[in-house]
Image (spheres, rainbow, N blue to C red):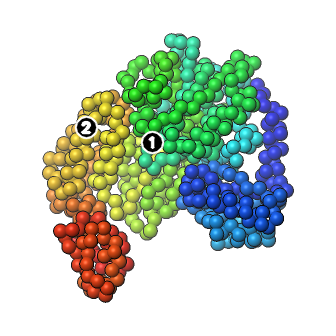
Amino acid sequence: MKILEKERAAAKEAWKKFADGDKIRILVGAATCGRAAGALGVMEEFKKELSKKGLSDSAEVVETGCLGLCYAEPLVEVKRPGEPSVLYSKVSAKDVADIVESHIESGKVLSRKAEAVMSPEPYQGVAPISQHPMMALQHRVVLRNCGIIDPSNFEHCLARGGYEGLERAFDLGPDETIEEMKRSGLRGRGGAGFPTGVKWGFARASKTSEKKYIVCNADEGDPGAFMDRSVLEGDPHSVLEGLMIAGFAIGAQVAYIYVRSEYPLAIERLKLAISQAEKAGLLKKKFPNGFEFEIRIKRGSGAFVCGEETSLMASIEGVRAMPRPKPPFPANRGLFGKPTNINNVETLAATGTIMREGAEEYAKLGSEKSKGTKTFSLAGKVERTGLIEVELGLKLGDIINKIGGGCSEGKKFKAVQTGGPSGGCLTADHMDLPVDYENLARVGSIIGSGGMVVMNEDSCMVEVAKFFISFTESESCGKCVPCRIGTRHCREILEKICAGKGEPRDIERLEKICSTMKTSALCGLGQTAPNPILTTLKYFRDEYDKHINEKKCPASVCPKLVKFTVVAEKCKGCTACERACPTGAISGGVKKVHSIDYTKCISCGACYQTCKFGAIARA
């Protein structure tokens, strides 16, 4: 069934003019990460400079989403007619005049800010984006439009194949659409990894009610994770199309997008996209095949437990977000007691491409049991932070060292936390591990929603475990005892160890509590909360032993176990440490050897970090 045929033809013409027309095009990455780095100010400066130069009519400044090179924000792409497009990085308002004068007016690339050229071949000495270390190993399916299109422009979506997957689903029919999803091998990207097609099949087969719902879980709560936000901000129509395909397949009439209130730009882009889809006749209109669909937005309040599907549904229904036992499963009795299917943002965003290009093409990607691609957010102590999309099965070391550039500041890699608070800490010994559902589970971790937090030699793994269990404790809904009490007891034991009061039997206590939580907690939050503790116990047991037996923190992170001293022969008397000390524990004066008053010292490390001469040492 062809839909929007005339609109699509017009959109392709408009895209052709946009991509390589007779106007100068300036794309500014203005997603949340770009805005935090000053992208909006850069945009305004470009408009002022173009006006000053009399170029306002021959050039256009356009917002786009996140390309993924978050460490290099703000990103600006400049395209002169008939010439390759050049990507500039870390652009400040002060750089704008130079870019306009050199590149836009004279056609000479400003090499000091050039990051890559957006074409297959080098241009004026700038390497193509395909050779960029952060992009070379990527395979972008979900992120194919992010940073490329104007997410507020419906024509850009149509020109790039938007809603063609829905057309094919209409041609195949609901049952064959579900079979197509099964053949693709797509598994839920929210963390559990359950086969998407099978899940849709359960909801379609449910006969408990004729009214059915489809829910998009955009409640991205993992620390260091920002995949869903970037997709919603950079390509919202991909998610709407996925919802429509899923709704058509299972026989749903209404969809909810459950998105956290902390994502104002994502919500703004979603609202605009929904209104555009309604205006185009895609929503709230009956198609010739009888399908009619509505999409609503539900703002969440940032509760981590709402990542669990029964808690999420409770929140949509207007009651306290708490999980309930299963069965009954949502496919039979879900939202408002009706059959419901729940998928996350990334799962739905991949659906349109799978239906458009065919299940076989998608199934060629990935590993034997983990097909396709996965987005990951690289965060922490890594050189190149940002958002990436790679085939499942790529080695962990390739992600961290080749794509991420290894640890920043020349520090030594120590661990990576995959899967957020529910995941586990992996070590340098796991660099050859293929990143997929099976292999991560084998070593005690999970893919989760895709967060990867890299830690260097300065990280204390006992403190890391304490941080994550503290997070899950605060986010626990408190309904079941194993989670409510277990997270608290684990946190108290870890605090005791970090304070130098640990005992050998504390290890056994931690293991016993974690085991109980994994087997008896009501929902995934409590069942997976022990993972950071269990993996750090398994792979960093020596750090626990040093904390307990030697009362030392090898990374010198735990304040109660760290003591700083002044190395007299290295002290220059510059007073930097004295000025940095928050408690006034350091004294000495200009050009005099300083000393530390241990009755005032809180071992915060401010002096150690400030001293440029190595005169502050860890005892």
Q: Residue at x 22, y 41 (%)?
A: 489
Which numbered disc flags the more N-terminal residue, 1 or 2? 1
Can residue 238 be seen here?
Answer: no
Q: List x then y, in percent, for residue 495.
A: 23, 51
The mark found on residue 613 in the picture is: none
Nearest the viewer among 253 and 264 is 264
| Residue with the mark numbered 2 | 486
Q: Residue at x 18, y 60 (%)?
A: 551
| Residue 478 falls left or right of residue 360 | left
Q: Quadrant of the C terminus?
A: bottom left
Q: Residue at x 25, y 61 (%)?
A: 559
| Circle 1 crowding by C-alpha within 10 Å: few under 14, some 14–19, many from 20 | some
What residue type is disc 1 on? Answer: Gly
Q: Residue at x 26, y 84 (%)?
A: 593
| Circle 2 crowding by C-alpha within 10 Å: few under 14, some 14–19, many from 20 | many
Secondary structure beneath dot 1 equals loop
What residue type is disc 2 on? Answer: Gly
Q: Quadrant of residue 96?
A: bottom right
Q: Quadrant of the N terminus?
A: top right
Nearest the viewer among 23 and 365 is 23
Secondary structure beneath dot 2 equals helix
Q: List x then y, in percent, for residue 403.
A: 53, 58
Q: CA distance from mark 1 to mark 2?
A: 21 Å
Would you place residue 510 above or below residue 169 in this image?
below
Q: Quadrant of residue 61?
A: bottom right
| Residue 350 falls left or right of residue 458 | right
Q: List x then y, in percent, for residue 52.
A: 77, 66
Q: Quadrant of residue 233?
A: top right
The mark found on residue 221 in the picture is: 1
Can residue 324 be seen here?
Answer: yes
